[in-house]
Image (cartoon, rainbow, N blue to C red):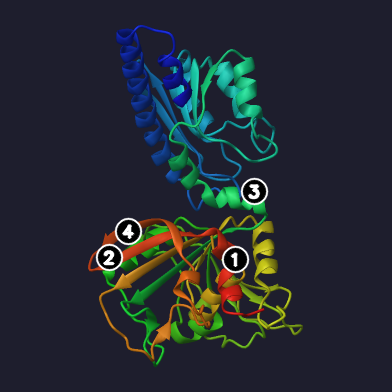
Amino acid sequence: MTRTLARAGRSRPASARRRAVRDALFDQTVAEFFMRLAVREAQKGLGRTSPNPAVGAVLVKNGRVIARGHHARAGGPHAEVVALRAAGGLARGADLYTTLEPCDHQGKTPPCSLAILAAGVRRVFVGSRDPNPLVNGRGVARLERGGITVVRDVLRDACDRVNAHWFTWITEGRPHVTLKAAVTLDGRIATRTGDARWVTGEAARAWVHRLRDRVDAVLVGAGTARADDPELTTRLPGGRGHDPVRVVLDTDLELPARLKLFHPRSAAPTLVAHASSRARRFGPGVELLRCRRARGGGVELRDLLAKLAARGVTHVLVEGGAHVHASFLEAGLVDRVAVIVAPKLAGADGLPLVARRGPARMADALRLSGVQVERLGDDVLVAGVPAAEGRRGALAKKAGRG
């Protein structure tokens, strides 16, 4: 769209340039409006399409939406095809808005680019570029060779956010990691006795369940599993919600078999990530996932994430506890931090958010960028992306740890 604006001001009388710029701004506003609808469609697939991306598509003709579609599950029809099928013959001459570049390869489904060409679509508006080596510009190139006008990067930031997890999986070979925690005003995740029920209120806990509904796996450490005995399921109103895979870190397979994690009332499996040479059974639906042992003890997190990625897990939600938070941060494996702050004080002897020695100078503290703040009842959500140095394991370096 920026190219359209740039061209609008070249070599024309002032009045004509103003009209051209106005028209270009109008076109951009219209394109962004319909792309937002496509983003909403894409969000319906979050947590359900892995290892595929979540994609939304909207078909527009004469300024009106004639069909919508989203990718609902891996192996099922892609968003563009769902929308084209819904529109039928009306798709000819229509504009297609899609949050991700259409695919151009044969996978479990035929290429979307060929379906778009066959439908007679007039223009295609694309949000995100597809970094998958099987696509990566080929879909757009195919459409343009077929005579379709393609407008790239429409509302790209919003479209990129929808598939941030999938981009990590494709480009880094590991799941995207979101670290989520609930803390008091003085930064404690539990009291001195380990009690953490409940740090936050009902609105914040409902937000957490909506987040679980959109991820592939949720992970806790052995300490959190013992202290809280969580189910790690998704509980949305009306019994709705997708249960993520549950992952618990138990290096030497010492957790008691009575924990709720090992007797889930859910079809989603529980994985016990360990580094032990011995065998143990926890119960039906519980699988042992052996990983390398880290030099400092514990499960080697990069190895664990690689194994989860191989299973098609693209987004992991890390929910505690303090030592697990520190381990992921020190390894530079946290892609996003979401901390819910409650208006409470737990005292200096409560459990901290990160159980590691910090830097000597505030200037060296790990900071977040792209910060978003949201009110959740009486609590406040603060979320952002660790700055570049944090992604390199700055917490360990600044504290002098190996």
Q: Identify the disc placed on residue 373.
A: 4
Q: Residue furthest left?
A: 378
Front residue (pair 293, 218): 293
The answer to whether 249 appears left or right of 295 in the picture is left
Lateral position of residue 75 relative to residue 6, left or right? right
Mark 2, residue position: 203
Residue to which mark 3 is pinned: 170
Drawn side of residue 156 relative to residue 27, left or right: right
Q: Position of residue 206 (x, y in %)?
A: 32, 64
| Residue denoted by label 1 | 332
Q: Residue at x 59, y 45 (%)?
A: 52
Mark 1 secondary-structure assignment: loop
Q: Residues within 10 Å of mark 1 (few under 14, many from 20)?
A: many
Structural distance between the alpha carbons of marks 3 and 4: 29 Å
Instruction: Check if mark 3's residue and mark 4's residue have beta carbons within 8 Å.
Output: no
Circle 3 packing at 10 Å, graded few (<14), some (14-19), many (20+), is: many
